[in-house]
Image (cartoon, helix red, strand yellow):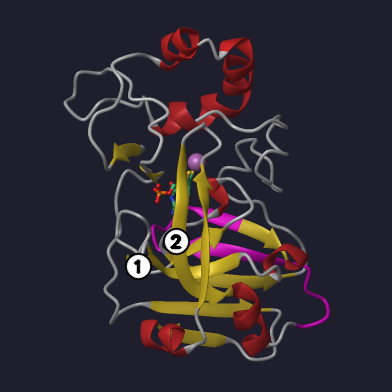
């Protein structure tokens, strides 16, 4: 079960391959597509136009696609929201939404890039740095990684501790100056700026500090665990779109 929603209008009335051919983007795009794109799009797609015509809307530059692997969109109000941080820490934390808002915020404006080829330019995120939360909890010396869980009950992700301590890793509660919407994984989601979108787990409710990397939902299906944009998943070029 899966769903894919596009929060903009229906896109171009052509299939991806046709579109690439029309633009003369050529074999390269189709080849990496076959490798990196297939699984996620097959699971989350086919990407259909909103009018139900079955036509693909592809590379909708400037628009997010809304992904959920459960087929549903879980709801948690800001009042009910809790974020647990536990595992190999000195002080397990159980943070409310207001607790998160009371921590020094960080802002990041970056492109949002899905491994399937769509990209949204210059998205502004606000939230708390993962490294600040780790410092609050106190990471034990045996720790090497983080395991993230979603209150959708299914999606998971991971980061190494070194990755998580970078300053472009956020526990985000605002996107484009507004609270992160439910569709986009609100009230709180992960935002992993230097990696493909699948690392940015939506509906975040748990961070466990672990002794080794436990691969996440899409990694178990074959996507790279270290998902650096432009340098993973069989791609070393600037993405299309
Ligand atoms: N819980 C959850 N998080 C998720 C996903 C998902 O299906 N479920 N999809 C991932 C993928 S593949 C991408 S590209 C982004 C998409 O974010 P958006 O739905 O806000 O556009 O979320 C990521 N985080
Ligand atoms: Mo994605």
Instruction: From the image, tell me which residue sits under label 2.
Output: 124
Image side of residue 52 versus residue 79, left or right: left
Residue 62 is situated, as x and y percent measured from the top left of the image, at 38, 40
Instruction: From the image, tell me which residue sits under label 1.
Output: 177
Circle 2 Cα neighbour tier, 10 Å, few/some/many (<14 / 14–19 / ≥20):
some
- Circles 1, 2 touching at the beta carbon (< 8 Å): yes
Q: Nearer the viewer, residue 10 or 218?
A: 10
Residue 85 is situated, as x and y percent measured from the top left of the image, at 57, 79
For the N terminus, the quadrant is top left
Q: Quadrant of residue 196?
A: top right
> Is residue 3 a member of the stretch shown in magenta?
no
Cα separation, mark 1 vs mark 2, equals 7 Å
> Is residue 152 a member of the stretch shown in magenta?
yes
Question: Does 230 sit above or below residue 156?
Answer: above
Dot placed on the residue nearer the N-terminal end, 1 or 2: 2
Residue 234's tag is: none
Image side of residue 31 versus residue 100, left or right: right
Circle 1 Cα neighbour tier, 10 Å, few/some/many (<14 / 14–19 / ≥20):
few
Question: Does 102 sit above or below residue 180?
Answer: below
Q: Tag 2's secondary structure?
A: strand
Q: Which residues are magenta?
A: 140-157
Residue 129 is situated, as x and y percent measured from the top left of the image, at 58, 75
Q: Tag 1's secondary structure?
A: loop
Q: Nearer the viewer, residue 85 or 176?
A: 176
The residue most toward the right is 141
- Identify which residue is drawn at 59% across, 87% down: 92
- Identify which residue is drawn at 38% across, 29% down: 45
Residue 119 is situated, as x and y percent measured from the top left of the image, at 48, 39
Q: Quadrant of residue 178?
A: bottom left
Q: How many marks?
A: 2
The residue most toward the left is 51
């Amino acid at each position: 079960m899966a769903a894919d929603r596009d929060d903009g209008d229906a896109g171009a009335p052509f299939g991806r391959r046709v579109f690439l051919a029309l633009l003369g983007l050529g074999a390269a795009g189709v080849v990496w597509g076959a490798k990196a794109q297939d699984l996620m799009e097959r699971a989350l797609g086919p990407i259909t136009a909103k009018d139900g015509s079955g036509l693909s809307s592809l590379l909708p530059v400037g628009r997010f696609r809304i992904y959920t692997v459960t087929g549903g969109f879980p709801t948690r109000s800001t009042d009910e929201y809790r974020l647990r941080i536990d595992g190999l820490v000195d002080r397990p934390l159980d943070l409310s939404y207001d607790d998160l808002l009371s921590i020094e915020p960080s802002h990041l404006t970056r492109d949002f890039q899905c491994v399937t080829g769509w990209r949204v330019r210059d998205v502004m995120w606000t939230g708390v740095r993962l490294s600040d939360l780790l410092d609050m909890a106190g990471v034990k010396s045996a720790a090497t990684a983080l395991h993230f869980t979603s209150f959708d009950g299914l999606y998971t992700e991971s980061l190494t501790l070194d990755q998580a301590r970078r300053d472009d890793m956020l526990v985000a509660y605002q996107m484009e100056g507004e609270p992160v919407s439910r569709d986009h994984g609100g009230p709180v989601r992960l935002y992993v700026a230097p990696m493909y979108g699948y690392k940015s787990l939506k509906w975040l409710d748990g961070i466990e500090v672990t002794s080794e990397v436990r691969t996440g939902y899409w990694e178990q299906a074959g996507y790279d665990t270290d998902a650096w944009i432009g340098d993973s998943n069989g791609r070393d070029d600037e993405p299309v779109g």
